[in-house]
Amino acid sequence: MAASFPETAISTERLLLRPLAEDDAPGLATMMADELVLAWTDLPHPFTEAYATELARTLAPAHRAAGRGIVFAVTEHLTQRLVGLVELRNTDWRLRSTEISYVTASWARGEGYAPEAVLGVSQWLFEDRDFLRLELRTAAGNTAAQQVAQKIGGISEGVLRSAWIVRGESGESGESGGSGEAAVESRSDLILWSLLPEDLDAPEPEPQRTGWHGDQRYVLRD
């Protein structure tokens, strides 16, 4: 049987990262209709509510069970509103290494949610799952994703030339809107970032992890 991540919830100061639920489908479909999501990710387009339901019901659980990674819905503690999606993929259990990708809803950008979510997952991976390497790959023109990598302490390891497909005109509005027409595609370099356990700042001593949030960074259900 392949190694796999447990069904897990991770709590940070403002966010709860939890398994996707079918009730997330409407918000997920709305979030993925954004032009920046279309431009920089390889998610299906159009990302329909039916596909979002299938992702929560079948695809994400199968992804986890097969040992390839895990998918988290990112929600606000205060409002329970869906603010993003985080996925671990291309997991190598022998090397204890995996790759992270993330999407933030358009209305939630600029609030620091992406680095908070990625850092929370990183801490969980290194401290509770004994992983030794986390990779991030950002398109050369995606400066927002590069800022996230820098904020969490990621180290740039180099450029993967012509390793990605960008849809639309560098993420700008215009030809590739949500009207259903085919997006213009072009090749892009990828910047490879890595994060190792020693790259994270040493955590401050904290109380025993018995509460819901605020006195802990994550909650495990395994």
Image (spheres, rainbow, N blue to C red):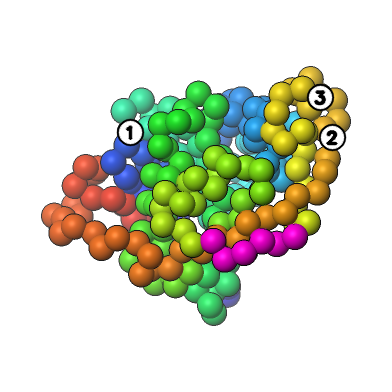
Q: Against 203, is 35 above or below?
A: above
Disc sitting over residue 77 in the figure: 1
Disc sitting over residue 175 in the figure: 3
In front: label 1 or label 2: 2
Using the numbered discs, state the Cα–Cα distance from disc 3 to disc 1 in whole angstroms: 36 Å
Using the numbered discs, state the Cα–Cα distance from disc 1 to disc 2 in whole angstroms: 38 Å
Q: Main secondary structure of the magenta part?
A: strand
Q: Earlier in the sequence, mark 3 or mark 1?
A: 1
> What is the residue that sits farthest to the top in this orientation?
179
Q: Residue at x 49, y 45 (%)?
A: 147
Using the numbered discs, state the Cα–Cα distance from disc 2 to disc 3 in whole angstroms: 7 Å
Disc sitting over residue 207 in the figure: none
Magenta residues, start to end: 156-161
Q: Residue at x 72, y 36 (%)?
A: 170
The image position of residue 204, as x and y in percent, is 18, 57
Residue 158 belongs to the span the image colors magenta:
yes
The image position of residue 130, as x and y in percent, is 39, 72
Residue indicated by mark 2 = 184
